[in-house]
């Protein structure tokens, strides 16, 4: 697993640190930022596009109805409102993650353990401030 983690970080053009805790920290950060980016991209798609990229096979499904409702309502917004909505979504998602990481720092040690690698992701007890570093390193939704 160590090789997979290092290989993954290299695909992100990250210099691999010598310290295993730092490697684990970066891996956790890349994972978190990947999830943030996924959900932002999904939300931004509803805001920016009146139709989904791929049509639904079952237009009557609850998922299709919800998708259409989002797109129909957001299409009525002007560009400034769309920009502000996207900013609010990004601040909210990042804020939730920041608060969660702050609480973890205070009360928990985050240890990731694989077959051949073990490390403490929050050795420095600064995961919440690491979030901003991770977003700069790995983020796609700026």
Image (spheres, rainbow, N blue to C red):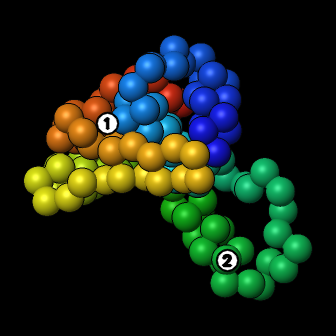
Q: Is residue 11 left or right of residue 107?
A: right
Residue 11 horizontal/vertical position (percent): 67, 24
**Residue 36 visible in the displayed image:** no
Callout 1 secondary element: helix
> Is residue 114 depicted above or below 134 in this figure?
below
Residue indicated by mark 2: 63
**Residue 124 visible in the displayed image:** yes
Q: Which residue is found at the position 44% from the left and 20% from the top?
A: 18
Q: Which residue is found at the position 77% from the left and 85% from the top?
A: 60
Quadrant into which the C terminus falls = top left
> Is residue 76 depicted above or below 128 in this figure?
below
Question: How many numbered badges does the structure rendering display?
Answer: 2
Which of pointers 2 and 1 indicates the residue nearer the eye?
1
Q: Which residue is found at the position 64% from the left and 45% from the top?
A: 1
> Is residue 134 depicted above or below 24 in this figure?
above
- Marks 2 and 1 sit apart, C-alpha to C-alpha, by 32 Å
Q: Nearer the viewer, residue 126 or 96?
A: 126
In the picture, residue 127 is in which quadrant?
top left
> Is residue 20 depicted above or below 41 in this figure?
above
In the picture, residue 129 is in which quadrant?
top left
Residue 94 horizontal/vertical position (percent): 32, 45
Residue 29 horizontal/vertical position (percent): 42, 39
Q: Is residue 117 left or right of residue 21?
A: right
Callout 2 secondary element: helix
Looking at the image, which residue sits at the far front?
Answer: 116
Residue indicated by mark 1: 131
Q: Which residue is found at the position 78% from the left and 51% from the top?
A: 53
């Amino acid at each position: 697993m160590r090789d997979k983690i290092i290989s993954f970080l290299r695909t992100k053009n990250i210099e691999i640190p010598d310290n295993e805790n730092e490697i684990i920290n970066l891996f956790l950060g890349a994972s978190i930022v990947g999830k943030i980016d996924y959900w932002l991209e999904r939300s931004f798609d509803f805001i920016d596009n009146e139709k989904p990229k791929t049509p639904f096979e079952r237009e009557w499904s609850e998922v299709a109805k919800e998708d259409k409702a989002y797109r129909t309502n957001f299409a009525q917004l002007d560009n400034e409102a769309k920009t502000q909505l996207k900013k609010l979504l990004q601040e909210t998602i990042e804020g939730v993650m920041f608060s969660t990481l702050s609480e973890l720092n205070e009360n928990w040690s985050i240890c990731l353990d694989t077959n051949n690698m073990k490390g403490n992701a929050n050795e420095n007890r600064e995961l919440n401030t690491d979030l901003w570093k991770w977003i700069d390193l790995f983020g796609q939704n700026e």
